[in-house]
Amino acid sequence: MMEHKILEHLLVKIKQIEDQYAIALAGKSARDYAEYSEMCGVFKGLSLCKGEIDTMMQRFKEDEDNE
């Protein structure tokens, strides 16, 4: 199913970006609290996106199994 492949690709890309932010946060690369807070917000947003995509993938799988 094409949707499943697209969602898998999105998960890979999101994970790559998330890893970059995790490295930056661990490396204390934020110049100040505002930048740190923004980085944390982006990281949280990426995590929420992954959760939504995982949910969609599970629903697609369940729909396929029911067909």
Image (cartoon, grey):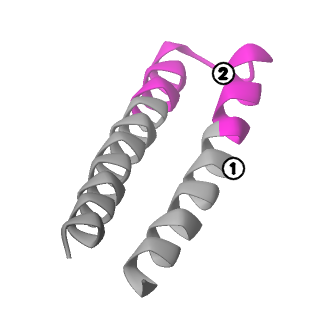
Q: Amino acid at mark 2?
A: Arg
Residue name at image x 49 percent, y 32 percent? 43
The residue lying toward the viewer, choosing from 48 and 43, is 48
- Residue beneath disc 1: 16
Q: Residue at x 74, y 15 (%)?
A: 26
Look at the picture and state if 60 lies above or below 22.
below
Q: Identity of the amino acid at label 1?
A: Gln
* Mark 2 or mark 1, earlier in chain: 1
- Mark 2 and mark 1: Cα distance apart in space: 22 Å
**Is 5 positioned to the left or the right of 60 in the image?**
right
The numbered mark at residue 38 is: none
Q: Taking 39 as reference, is 59 above or below it?
A: below
**How far across and how far down the image is residue 28, in percent?**
74, 15
Dot 1 falls on a residue whose secondary structure is helix
Q: Which residues are magenta?
A: 19-41
Q: Mark 1, residues whose alpha carbon is within 10 Å: few (<14), some, or many (≥20)? A: few
Q: Position of residue 5 (x, y in %)?
A: 52, 76
Q: Residue 9, located in which quarter of the rendered image?
A: bottom right
Residue under circle 2?
A: 31
Q: Determine the residue positioned at 67% across, 20% down.
A: 25
Foreground: 12 or 54?
54
What SS does tag 2 mark?
loop
Q: Position of residue 33 (x, y in %)?
A: 50, 13
When asked about the image quadrant of residue 24, the answer is top right
Q: Residues within 10 Å of mark 2 (few under 14, many from 20)?
A: few
In what quadrant of the picture does the C terminus appear?
bottom left
Give the left or right position of residue 13, taking residue 64 as reference.
right
Task: Say whether residue 28 is magenta.
Answer: yes
Which corner quadrant holds the N terminus?
bottom left
Residue 44 located left or right of residue 25? left
Left or right of residue 2: residue 20: right
